[in-house]
Amino acid sequence: MTTETASDPSPIQRLITNPLAAGKIAVAVAVFAVILLIPTPEGLTAQGQRALAVMVFAVILWATEVIPVPVAGIMGVILLVLVGAVGGLGEALYGFSHPVAYFLVGILTLGLAVQYSGLAERMATFLIRGAAGSPRLLYVQMLLSFALLTFALPSASTRGAIMVHVYERVLAHWNIPQEHRYHKAIMLAMGSLNRLGSTALLAGGITPVVASGLLGDFSWTQWFILMSVPFYANLIVGGIVLFIFYRSGFRLDTEGAAQLSTGPVSQVEVRAGVIVLVTALLWFTDFAHGLHPAVPALIALTVILLPRVGILTWREFEQNVGWTNFFVIATSLCLANAFVTTGGAAWFSAALVESVSPILTSPPLMLLTLCVCFAVVRMLVPNIAGYLALVIPVAVATGEALGLDPLVCGLAAVIVGDSVVYYGAGGTSAVFVYTRANIGNPEIMRFGIIMTVVAIAVLFLLVLPYWAVIGHPLSP
């Protein structure tokens, strides 16, 4: 690692000498200024207009990655205060007091403990032997694990934080660098497709919990019957599309790669395994104890850091847990909360739907138009909880007004919104994987757009006919 000398250009000098980077920042600033200075549209509050300006500014910076994503998020939080979009600094820092941010720290620590204990190495050995040296078979195993492991580890963030270490070990032993197309395919699947296995289950994380609360009471079985087909189909089709796009990277010769050796299971591996299993059990039985998912995660963090009992020292924790991830998710929560609470998000969604509703002529076209609107809103609201809270009420109300099944419209909003990741900051599971894999937002955005097309196609070609058969046609 090199250090900067007096002759090295400063970040500002590098920005000035890079016209493309300077142009991207200029576009973000110009759009921000235009939205902020135009007359306030009818139905939108002044605070909502300011929050909209800040959100669009941050989204442009996130999408272009002209500056580090955490820095862009922090800039957005500061702007919320400076332009008066929120009542004060406390409100602007909403995301830093949100349980999800600390849930993230807990699961990152859990993944780190699996790595340090050697359990990740043992799991990597199992995967390599199971794949028989075949990159294609390893890829198929990974896609299957996204669905099967959900029943033991419902949280996509938890699975991602643990399994990313495992696949890093496998790729390292196959001498595959981060720049290789196979490495990118594995990590894009981990960051963007892994989440699809969770939403098929009612206990699968924040998305089904929030969505089911907004749409009505569901039993575990009812939710699985409705949502397993769309999300497992998106997982399969998305995996195939990703394979086709990166197929040249799957032509690997792994015969000469170093093999992992296995020894007897150590006590520290046993402790790591017990901590993971107990934490997963607490998450899976939340219907009985009612604890927020952050509580088991923080319990696991505490046990992992306890002297003698634990696995990590405090120094290992503070140096390796990845605080960048914490700032990314916390700042995205701050911006999403301001966008929703000021009315900016609701106004934007309503304006999108209202602008196209007069030209709709058939129920499928109505739903297709709504799905496009959902995708646009999802791009503007990286936080899935904020997106759902904003879009589902609009989708249900619009469905009722247009004579469509409100439940179908609401579930369609969940499918379109939760099947995609547009930015590295698009969720707790994505941010950790993409930061470690060094995959940039332009590449993530490209696959996100592809998955948007996949999700809408699966919805219309497979899911709507399936829902009609089980008693939920688009037009009652």
Image (cartoon, helix red, strand yellow):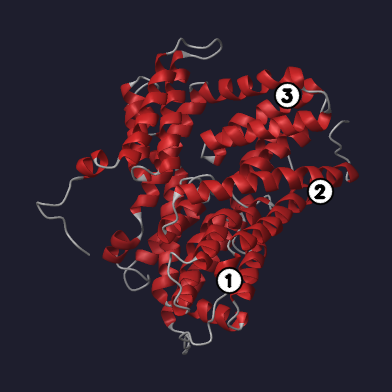
Callout 2: SS: helix
From the viewer's perspective, is residue 44 above or below residue 296? above
Task: Tell me the residue that label 3 is attached to.
Answer: 398
Q: Nearer the viewer, residue 116 or 417?
A: 417
- Kindly indicate whether the residue at mark 1 contacts the one at mark 3 (C-beta within 8 angstroms): no
Task: Using the image, determine if residue 6 lies above or below residue 92.
Answer: below
Q: Earlier in the sequence, mark 3 or mark 1?
A: 1
Q: Nearer the viewer, residue 98 or 120?
A: 120
- Report which residue position mark 2 lands on: 462
Q: Which residue is mark 1?
A: 250
Mark-to-mark CA distance, 3 and 2: 23 Å
If you read the primary sequence from the N terminus, does the residue marked by circle 3 or circle 2 appear first?
3
Give the quarter of the figure containing the C terminus: top right
Q: Is residue 243 visible?
A: yes
Q: Tag 1: residue type?
A: Phe
Residue 290 seen anywhere in this rendered image of the structure: no
Q: Position of residue 218 (x, y in %)?
A: 74, 43
Mark 3 vs mark 1, foreground winner is: 1
Q: Is residue 470 left or right of residue 388?
A: right
Label 3 sits on a secondary structure element that is helix
Residue at 37% over, 72% down: 309
Instruction: State the SS at label 1.
Output: helix
Number of other residues with Cα within 10 Å of mark 3, as a class: few under 14, some 14 to 19, many 20 or more = many
Amino acid type of the residue that numbered disc 2 sits on in the rendered structure: Leu
